[in-house]
Image (spheres, rainbow, N blue to C red):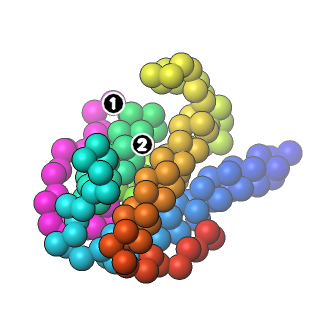
Amino acid sequence: MIFNNLQSQNTVISAFLLKWENSKNYLVEIANSMPEEAYSFKPTKREMSFQEQLLHIRENMVWLSETYFMKEGEKSEKIEPKTKEEIITQLTASFNNVSEIIKTISIEDLSTKVEFFSGPKSKLQILNLLQDHVTHHRGQLIVYLNLNNIQPPKYSGW
């Protein structure tokens, strides 16, 4: 029976970590594809710019991972990267930090209920939200590349 619990933990967390690493690599490719002078591009006035999208993705990763998977007092300092290189470096570091945080949680912890602005959620739901949020905004960034006649990198789901 212990083997099945370990197997389940490895399946849930390992699957997330593998997908997370691929998500990071794909988003970094997208971020690298846009010339720095186009980082201020936004399709309409009401939408975020390419740069703002990347920073929003990063901020959400930091907020979700540190709020729901870390102990109090372990939060990172607020960083506001400005250049393309700084943004990509910090985005990569944030992805890596999420991976390190998630590696430390137990399968039992994923069923823990937490308070969320839309109502109580399990930590597994928060883990899924981490990935879903990145995917949502990454899709928008692909449109931004296309609107600038830049071929987006080939998708790699796994």
Residue type pointed to by label 1: Glu
Tell me the quarter of the picture where residue 84 sits. Answer: bottom left
Tell me the quarter of the picture where residue 148 sits. Answer: bottom left
- Is residue 85 one of those drawn in magenta? yes
Left or right of residue 35: residue 103: right
Q: Picture coordinates of residue 44 (x, y %)?
A: 29, 51
Q: Picture coordinates of residue 115 (x, y %)?
A: 49, 20
Q: Picture coordinates of residue 125 (x, y %)?
A: 60, 36
Estimate how packed mark 1 is, as few (under 14), some (14 to 19) or many (20 or more) residues with alpha carbons within 10 Å.
Answer: few
Residue at point 41%, 71% (across, down): 146
* Residue under label 1: 72
* Residue 43 vertical position relative to residue 104 in the rendered view, above or below: below
Q: In the rendered structure, which segment of residues is drawn in magenta?
A: 71-92
Q: Nearer the viewer, residue 8 or 133?
A: 133
- Total labels: the figure holds 2
- Is residue 140 one of those drawn in magenta? no
- The quadrant of the rendering that contains the N terminus is top right
Left or right of residue 4: residue 31: left
Residue at point 45%, 34% (across, down): 68
Q: Secondary structure at mark 1?
A: loop
User: Does residue 58 appear anywhere in the picture?
Assistant: no
Q: Nearer the viewer, residue 31 or 44?
A: 44
* Residue under label 2: 65
Residue type pointed to by label 2: Ser
Q: Secondary structure at mark 2?
A: helix
